Image (cartoon, rainbow, N blue to C red):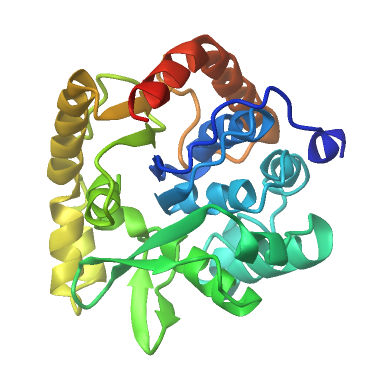
């Protein structure tokens, strides 16, 4: 619990006018968690954050200013079969037990500060994919009730094949990364022209086309727009990475991403491996911090 109670240090620029854009990536999001805790230690309070899937899931503890909470959940629960496991799939047709992850854990075990989340100076937007339209929708997270919190994060993290569709407002939703893997365009649409972007893949990575197109079409045949979004995801994702590379050269984005290819998969739930990724992220952040401070300063 020491990580949870650790005090912040080095009060530097408050990044109120800079948006934070967070990619998903499943359990690779522990890289993001390490970066977000460094932000808290340096009191880098971004005024706006937007994330999909794991990016949103790890962001909520940053928005509530609960340093170390993601690490504590990882240490205690990611290997727990109630969190992720085949028995969940047998019982509920999902490898993730959302009731446990987004209700029992934050309300009973590693407490989440809903009040601090609601009142935070960081506005969080969470991306989800509408199964009927195949399009991204972004919802404000800060004012959610605990049940709304669970529903929205569950929907944003509901990966194809290993999770079921989530009902919100009488419509079905799934993983936000299907439609917008890196939600930079929404941040720009919300009025920003520059952004700090956290990715969970190394520079040069490009996604290969899916090998499961037939299975996708068979599984989601009643949702043709969702099928189309899944079929074109790699192409759209790679185009965004190309665009980010260009925007980085222009100085419009500052990209934080692993220096080497991550050795964990999106479904890796070994706490020791994930904790190692967390600390790798922090070491890499320490190296890039002077450049990040200069980039933020240039935009003020």
Name the image quarter holding the C terminus.
top left
On the image, the x and y values in percent for residue 226 come to 20, 67
Name of the residue lying farthest toward the bottom? 170
Q: Residue at x 20, y 41 (%)?
A: 237
Left or right: residue 288 compared with residue 237: right
Q: Residue at x 80, y 34 (%)?
A: 3
Q: Residue at x 20, y 68 (%)?
A: 134
On the image, the x and y values in percent for residue 155 come to 44, 68
In front of the other: 101 or 283: 283
Q: Look at the image and tell me whether residue 151 can be seen.
A: yes
In front of the other: 187 or 200: 187
Left or right: residue 69 compared with residue 276: right
In front of the other: 252 or 69: 252
Q: Residue at x 12, y 42 (%)?
A: 235
Q: Is residue 248 above or below residue 266?
A: above
Q: Which image quadrant is residue 249 in?
A: top left
Q: Is residue 300 above or below residue 89?
A: above
Q: Which image quadrant is residue 248 in?
A: top left
Q: Which image quadrant is residue 130 in?
A: bottom left
Q: Is residue 85 above or below residue 27?
A: below
Left or right: residue 2 compared with residue 223: right
On the image, the x and y values in percent for residue 289 come to 51, 16
């Amino acid at each position: 619990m020491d990580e949870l109670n650790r005090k912040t240090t080095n009060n530097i620029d408050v990044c109120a006018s800079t948006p934070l854009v967070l990619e998903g990536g499943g359990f690779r999001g522990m890289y993001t968690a390490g970066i977000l805790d460094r932000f808290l230690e340096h009191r880098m309070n971004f005024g706006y954050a937007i994330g999909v899937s794991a990016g949103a899931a790890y962001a909520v503890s940053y928005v509530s200013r609960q340093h170390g909470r993601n690490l504590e959940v990882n240490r205690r629960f990611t290997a727990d079969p109630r969190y992720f496991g085949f028995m969940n799939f047998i019982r509920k047709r999902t490898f993730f037990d959302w009731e446990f992850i987004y209700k029992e854990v934050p309300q009973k075990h590693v407490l989440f500060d809903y009040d601090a989340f609601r009142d935070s100076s960081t506005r969080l937007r969470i991306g989800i994919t509408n199964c009927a339209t195949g399009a991204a929708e972004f919802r404000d997270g800060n004012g959610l009730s605990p049940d709304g919190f669970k529903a929205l994060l569950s929907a944003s993290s509901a990966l194809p094949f290993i999770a079921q569709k989530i009902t919100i407002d009488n419509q079905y939703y799934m993983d936000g990364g299907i439609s917008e893997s890196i939600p930079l365009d929404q941040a720009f649409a919300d009025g920003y022209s520059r952004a700090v972007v956290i990715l969970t893949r190394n520079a040069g990575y490009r996604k290969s086309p899916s090998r499961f197109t037939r299975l996708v079409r068979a599984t989601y045949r009643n949702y043709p727009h969702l099928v189309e979004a899944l079929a074109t995801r790699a192409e759209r994702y790679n185009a965004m990475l190309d665009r980010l590379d260009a925007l980085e050269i222009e100085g419009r984005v500052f990209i934080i991403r692993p220096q080497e290819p991550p050795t964990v998969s999106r479904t890796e739930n070994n706490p020791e491996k994930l904790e190692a990724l967390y600390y790798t992220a922090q070491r890499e952040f320490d190296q890039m911090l002077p450049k990040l401070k200069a980039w933020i300063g240039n935009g003020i």
